[in-house]
Image: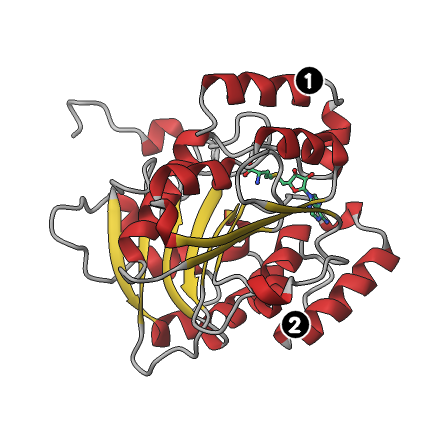
Amino acid sequence: MLEVSGIAAQEKLDSEKSHAERNRLGQFATPSALASDMLRLIKSELPKNFKIRFLDPAFGTGAFYSALLGTFNENRIESASGIEIDPHYANHAVELWKGSPLILQISDFFDAKVPAKYKPNLIVCNPPYVRHHHLSSERKGKLQRLVATAAMTKLNGLAGLYCYFLLYAHAWLEEGGYACWLIPSEFLDVNYGAEVKDYLLSKVTLLRIHRFNAASVQFDDALVSSSILWFRKSAPPANHTVEFSFGDSLTKPEILRTVPTSRLKKTAKWNRAALSGTKAKEGTKVRLGDLFDIKRGLATGANDFFILSPEEI
Ligand SMILES: C[S@@+](CC[C@H](N)C(=O)[O-])C[C@H]1O[C@@H](n2cnc3c(N)ncnc32)[C@H](O)[C@@H]1O
């Protein structure tokens, strides 16, 4: 496991780069507790005899690989591979995982080749969060073409790099394999997320979406609210339902709902679809926001009129 010494090494590697450089390649490591929670979720969901061929296509120093080794017995792991574009992190990872069976390619994910023998059946990834305006038009054109072939989807030009990672990985994942992605929550509600949501409803079987509380940002230094996607690469069955959960903890969510995909298909903004009008699982709390649209008030300048004194009440 990437414990104290791993965290210190990660901090040292990060400190050798400027914030701007790390932003350019979305270099913000997954906290090890969160990586472990994700792998625990995966373990509880995978069929018992499932032999894992693992891939993290944005490997960094290997937060997920570390959690994989800490969660599964060796005999469940058939192979493990990673791809990392930046030698600064990749070379450290090579040292760190020397002697383990990891196969690490130092490459741009979009130029790497699927190792035929180890086609992954489990992808776990926290892809770089790079906004679209930091992608050159040439790069965007290339990525759009790759995604069109990999997932038969044309991504909106406003989509960030993480959307390209998610959809391009479709071609890498074995049919019947599983994927767990830690991505910004934006796609749930913004227009450029439409193609991503369409992919999740039509090309794979979406199993769960967990949205973290925006106030408890998972990545102190990247400042984005994050969600976890969990799906299987297989055509979605009829009358399928998706688990939506919300809260600080993936394993003990504050809200857990089951939402039919028929409902998601009709809804552009999934946050709303997920939280309103559906049956809460026993033991989870219903909040005011589940029942009403809550907006910040307008400043009318007429507080005398709107705010009642205790006597008036
Ligand atoms: C958000 S970090 C995640 C790192 C690690 N997997 C973790 O969870 O801590 C994203 C990683 O993707 C790498 N990266 C960025 N663009 C890439 C690309 N085109 N191909 C492969 N890796 C890339 C970055 O250098 C960075 O290490």
Q: Is residue 257 left or right of residue 219?
A: left
Which element is circle 2 on? helix
Mark 1: few/some/many CA within 10 Å (<14, 14-19, 20+): few
Q: Amino acid at mark 2?
A: Ala
Question: Which numbered disc flags the more N-terminal residue, 1 or 2?
Answer: 1
Image quarter where the N terminus lies is top left
Q: CA distance from mark 1 to mark 2?
A: 36 Å
Mark 2: few/some/many CA within 10 Å (<14, 14-19, 20+): some
Q: Is residue 213 left or right of residue 19?
A: left
Q: Are marks 1 and 2 in contact (CB under 8 Å)?
A: no
Image quarter where the C terminus lies is top left
Q: Is residue 259 left or right of residue 26?
A: left
The percent position of residue 30, horizontal first and vertical second, equals 51, 34
The percent position of residue 34, horizontal first and vertical second, equals 41, 35
Asked if residue 96 is positioned above or below residue 254 in the image, the reply reads above
Asked if residue 191 is positioned above or below residue 77 in the image, the reply reads below
Residue at x 88% of width, y 59% of height: 138
The percent position of residue 93, horizontal first and vertical second, equals 63, 33
Q: Which residue is mark 2?
A: 150
Q: Which residue is mark 1?
A: 15
Residue at x 80% of width, y 50% of height: 135
